[in-house]
Amino acid sequence: MTEPTAPAPAAAPTKVALVTLGCARNEVDSEELAARFEAGGFRLVDDSAMADAVVVNTCGFVEAAKKDSVDTLLAAADLKSDGHAQAVVAVGCLAERYGRELAESLPEADAVLGFDDYPDIAGRVRTLLGGQGHVSHAPRDRRTMLPISPVERSSAAGFVPGHAAEPDLPEGLAPASGPRALRRRLGDGPVAPLKLASGCDRRCSFCAIPRFRGSFVSRRPGDVVAEARWLATQGVREVFLVSENSTSYGKDLGDLRLLESLLPELAAVPDVRRVRVSYLQPAETRPSLVQVLGGTPGVAPYFDLSFQHASASVLRRMRRFGDPQRFLDLLDQVREHAPLAGVRSNVIVGFPGETEDDVDVLCDFLQAARLDAVGVFGYSDEDGTEAAGLDGQHDAEEIRARVEHVGRLTEELTAQRAEERVGETVEVLVELAHGDLVEGRAAHQGPDVDGSTTLVDAPDSLVVGDVVRARVVGSSGVDLIAQPLEVVA
């Protein structure tokens, strides 16, 4: 009599590591990819050396970000030669923007996948691991994929990263009810980005993002609120709304003031303590939005205003609008509604045709503006942009000198602004509680780039996710030091 054979042991799940570079919008996209991998039978691992496949979500915004993305892909490829990973895959903005060209110039990557590959990302990577290759896409201007008229886009939009919804998903990868946003958290902190919209309709002469991210498309309010409710069940206490241009939200849904009605609804989601909005276009920041951002309980009085410069002549060459007085008037409006509001911005120096007088105009504006945080970037030519063909180009050394000059000034000014906050009462969301070190961010401090607040003599009972009312007693650069008064949530 033949003995029955034991069943073969189940094969271990294929392991994948996701490496995310760039902005918070990429973080959302990575969490969508993570959900798709899990739904496709993969197991996510944090350590690339333990993975069968390493997927790098690249950034393609400026030259330094592109280099960082390529270096990360090359480092992942080294793991293959060490006998670890079997496949290295490029996704994200750099991959979408250059496609086949990137694949040809970087043979160390086994595949370069575009946004249209995301719906079947698990199948694509499994095919690669099976020894089959992948033909990289030829890049195209994604703005051509949608109607010119914004109100005609909602029914015509194809796949947009971060907007995906699926009817049937495994438990834990999406809200239990309502619109089924496809997402799996990759961290466990109390702050999470939430995509509000994608793409941009503006034509800034220095920016290539609309070419590979496409025209502006809003997510529907019900989808955004449902995802916020799900994030709250995952321990998120601050929802950080991200997009390429938040002030345009709703224009393709027939209501340009939709953000004003959405924000109070998000602030009312149980367990969400704070809602923050990123990337506001100054020219589109209307009084009604300033009022809601500055006066709605649960909404951070935080204004991430993309000034980019202050000289009117430079702004015109950038195909943007404004001048120092208009920007200062806007800041007066903000502080009228919310005197303690946080304001951050980014500026570009070394733009083609920028004179020393233009730099002086920018510096004078920065001194008058009293901003809490400023990112200073040196101009770099971007493929396919109008600015790359403008006259008056500066050499790399001159751009670097201007970045250092304006950067030193902004460091001094933002440190002074932090000193001005000594004596203020702030509400701090605790993000780190380890022994005597308790650290978080006040409402005027955005994630990652705007500084933090350290709580001194904090009670041992504080845990990550608590919101503490505290009095500012000191500062160090842009960072604050505060004395706890009470736990408010």
Image (spheres, rainbow, N blue to C red):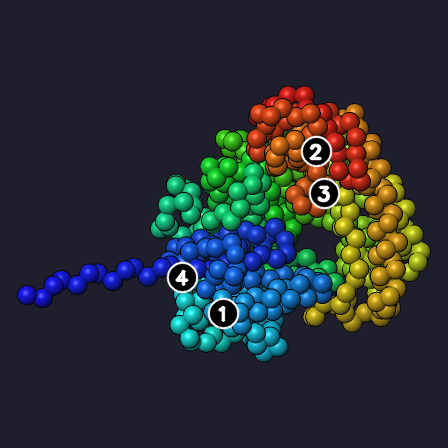
Give the amino acid at mark 3.
Asp
The residue under label 4 is 14
The residue under label 2 is 454
The residue under label 3 is 450
Label 2 packing within 10 angstroms: few (<14), some (14-19), many (20+)? many
Q: Secondary structure at mark 3?
A: loop
The residue under label 1 is 83
The residue drawn where x is 74% and y is 63% is: 206
Give the percent coordinates (x, y) of residue 261: 57, 36
Quarter of the rendering occupied by the N terminus: bottom left
Give the amino acid at mark 1.
Gly
CA gap, disc 1 to disc 3? 41 Å
Give the percent coordinates (x, y) of residue 189: 56, 41
CA gap, disc 1 to disc 4? 16 Å
Task: Note whether 246 is above or below 148 in the view shown.
Answer: above
The residue drawn where x is 78% and y is 72% is: 389
